[in-house]
Structures are given as C-alpha cells and as structure tokens.
Amino acid sequence: MEGEEKTINGHNWFVELDPSPDTLFKFELGSTAVLIKGVSLGVFTESNGIVKKQQLHHRADGLGQDCHSETVIPFGVEPLVRRDTEFSDGSLRVVTDIGIGGRASYDDIEVDPLEITGKLRRIAVADIPESGQPFPEPKWQELTAAETVFFSGDKPFLYCIVEDEQGKCLTIGCGDDLWRWSGAAELEGVTAEFSIAASTAGVAIRRKPYIFPKEYSCGNRSWRFKWFIGWCGEQSSVTGDWEELKLDPAELPEHIQAFDADGKRHPEMICKQAPAWRKAFKKAVRAAAARGAKIYVKADQPVFCGDAAHMDRNRKSFLPHCDMMISLELYQWAKQTMKAANGDFKLEYE
C-alpha cells in the first residue's frame, strides 16, 4: 500500500514486502532469495485481490517484527485471506487463514508457493514420520544445471533444506498442524499434491493440500495452514557466567511425552507443544529474568506426537503434530524476555 513501510531488516537478512504484483514478499539471506507467492483458489489468486489491511510492527528491542495482512479475492463469495508473519533472527513463521464465507466450489487450494533463487549447491527433503518416531536425518543430494523433481506426492514433506555455495542453509517446513496439511485423506474424493523441483539456479516448492472433485462444496468454512523458514542466526559459544536452563521431565505430568498412534507414550521424547511443558519453560525463564541472568538451552531434535490435547483439541483422540514451530516461538519469546530484564538467552548447538 502506497506510503507504507515495505522493508524489514535483520542480522544478515532482508525482507521486502510486495516486491512485484504476484509476490507477497521477498526474503534475502546473502546471495539466496526466496519469493513467497500468495494463495490460489482454483483460477482465483490472492495476487489479484484487494488488500484491506497490511500492518508492519517493529518491536522496540529489535528482536522481532511481524506483519498482519488481509486480502479479499473479489470474485464469487469473495474469500478473505489473512496472514500473520513473524520475523526474527533465525526464523520466519507464517500462519495463513483462508475464509470462504459462503457456498463455493474451487478446483483446489494452493498455499503460498515458493521460489528460491541463488547459487545453490545441494538439497535435502524429508517425509513426515509417524508420531513417536525420531526426527529424520537429512539425506543430501547434489543439484545440477538440469531441473530435477526431488519430491512429488499426495502427502506433505516435513522439511526441505537448501544449501548455497557458501554453505548457508534455508529450511522450509510444515508448522505444528501436520493434520491440516494432510487433511485431504480424511475427505471423500479429495486429493493433494506437493512437489519440489530444483536445479543449481533455483528451487520451486508447490503445495496443494486440497484438490477437490467437480462441484465439491468447500465454502462456508475457514482453512488454516502454518509453515516456516529457518536459517542459522547469529551464534557464539557459551562462555563465562552463562547458565544452562534445565527442566526435569520427571517433575512434570506424563502427558508431556510424545504419544503415538498405538496409544504409547515415549519418555525419551518430550513434546514442547504440551501445555505443561510450555508453562514450565516460561516459568523457568521468568525466574532467570528476575535475576538478570544469561541462560542457554541445548538445541535438541524436534518431536512428533499425536496427543490432541497438546493442540487444545481434547475432543480428538489423535492429532499428528510436530513441535518444531512452537520451539522457534518459545526460544524467541525467551530471548525477548531475558533481554528486557538485562539478561540474555541463546541456543547452544552441539
């Protein structure tokens, strides 16, 4: 919107809002750029919509910035796309809401396609494992000048890591709502299509979580999708008077443990999406902030879980999710809380 601020700056990264008519924002990390496109409902696209709102908010401490937008697609029942994007050093987190407020039929829903450009070297793509299973290790494949399809299927990928020639990596992944990205399987006649094609010049990521049969009514409801881009933020070794922040799972309820489809708990896997874990973590951070301490947490692998109560869906018996996105959110909150108290917070990578 004319006259409004259109750029966001971070540590070695930069974002430009609305850089072209068909692009929501452009993210740059070094020589690598990511173009984030908008939602499509069949032939109707967000890029042809009318922007009702676009608000950019900068935190006073400089540690986080966010953008809220609302766009009406002015055709038929006039669907509304709301998007909340949070920017911080090391992650970009997106929540896309699509409201279809009347009876309507579309061929499909496509969510925020991505184009990554730069001098790219290799790629790793991982499938979503079952709940209670370990986080998959990256399986790297070298890129060539010829475009190659590295992923194609009716189920979403968990993450895609793209590395450039300087060794900088970007990770594009699903949010905690794995059940939404995989929801087509629960609807009769509905399919999905996810694909990743790449070469040394670029990567194209397409996500169609819902492809509807002819005259399928998908209106009178809203659709939500979460996803993120992660990268290595500023890192330094823990020295001096830094304290490790530790929580003892034995002192917390058993339901913080990952829950699988067979109803088994996994004590070695703690789901950070569990309300009891989040509450304990924030309590420990606030206690450290009261002392103005400098604290760190050892980074661990994300966890896959099916406990619906972790997602505040107690009526469901099983709801697959991953705690990657909530971990990013909690660590960002901890850094902001500690900085405000003249302390500090960081992740320690092994």
Image (cartoon, rainbow, N blue to C red):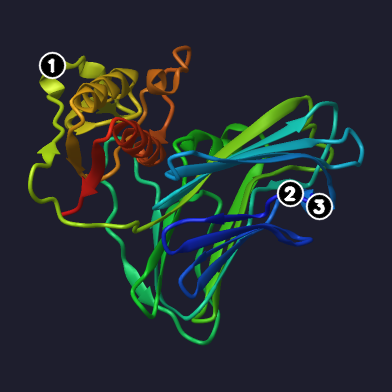
Label 1 packing within 10 angstroms: few (<14), some (14-19), many (20+): few
Amino acid type, mark 2: Glu
SS state under label 2: loop
Q: For residue 225, which quarter of the picture?
A: top right
Residue at (31% x, 57% y) in the render: 234
Q: Which residue is mark 2?
A: 4
SS state under label 1: helix
* 194 versus 166 height, above or below: above
Check whether the beta carbons of the residues at disc 3 and disc 2 lie within 8 A of each other.
yes
Tell me where residue 251 appears, x and y as whole percent. 13, 16
Q: Which residue is mark 1?
A: 251
Q: For residue 35, which quarter of the picture?
A: bottom right
Q: Earlier in the sequence, mark 2 or mark 1?
A: 2
Taking the image as drawn, is residue 209 in sight? yes
Amino acid type, mark 3: Glu
Tell me where residue 115 appears, x and y as whole percent. 60, 66
Distance from Cα at disc 2 to Cα at disc 1: 49 Å
